[in-house]
Image (cartoon, helix red, strand yellow):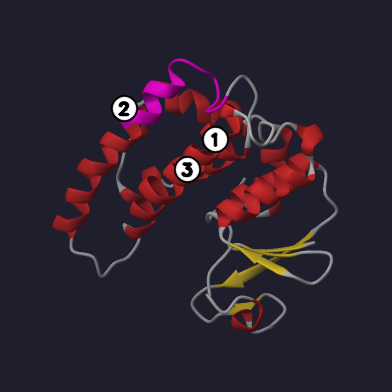
Amino acid sequence: MKLYYKAGACSLASHIALIEAGFDFTIEAVDLATKKTETGADFLAINPKGYIPALVLDDGQVLTEGVAILLYLASQAPDQSLAPAEGTPDYLRLVEWLVFVATELHKSVAGMFNPAIPDEVKELSKVTLRRRFDFAEQALAKSPYLVGQVPSVADFYLFTVVSWLPRVGIDPSAWPSLVAHSARVAALPSVQEALKAEKLV
């Protein structure tokens, strides 16, 4: 498999999952401004949507959208506990968290990197975002991870989004359980390996 990524972006969650699951894979960085990969390939020919992550499977198919990739990787490595067993209540909770992170956290935080968005709009977004992170804080005050006692693909995704907060002017220290969660996830060998591969540490 090959993961097309941008360092520190949402593709980091997929990168961590690939390592955690023990897959044989390669990575290739993408310049999202020029839509060129680090080898000079046209990224739009790989993923016409033009954004990351994109995962090329061993049979040549290309899978896009972070949630889909994370669920696929978890399903292909059932012994690694990256997701609860399909069909169980905990599995539905995992999907619920993945969708929440994708729609309520990821998109809102990522939008703040856009210099064209007025500051007053960003400040209004921060009010809503703080309520969303309050919800995650309450959940993590009761459990070390989002679903149960072991890290899942949802934790990798949340860790990635939380890592962006200081860069958009949000102090994560307001949510001590969330900060502790990020520290637990960051300490995983797979996470450290992904961060080093993306030259983030």
Name the image quarter holding residue 111.
Answer: bottom left
Measuring from the top left, give residue 24's x and y in whole percent: 85, 53
The residue type indicated by label 2 comes to: Ala
> Where does residue 164 sit, x and y in percent of width and height?
43, 47
Q: Residue furthest front?
A: 87
Image position of 121 with respect to 139: above or below: below
Image quadrant where residue 172 sits: top left
| Circle 3 SS class | loop
Question: Which badge, 1 or 3, comes first in the chain's sequence?
Answer: 1
Residue at 32% x, 65% y is 114
C-alpha distance separating marks 3 and 2: 14 Å
Report if residue 141 lies within the magenta region: yes
Location of mark 3 (residue): 163
Per the image, the residue denoted by label 1 is 92
Q: CA distance from mark 1 to mark 3?
A: 25 Å
- The residue carrying pointer 2 sits among few (fewer than 14), some (14 to 19) or many (20 or more) residues within 10 Å by Cα, namely few
| Image quadrant in which the C terminus is located | top right
Counting other residues with Cα less than 10 Å from the Cα at mark 3, is it few (<14), some (14-19), or many (20 or more)?
A: some
- What span is in magenta? 134-147
42 part of magenta stretch = no
Q: Which mark is residue 174?
A: 2
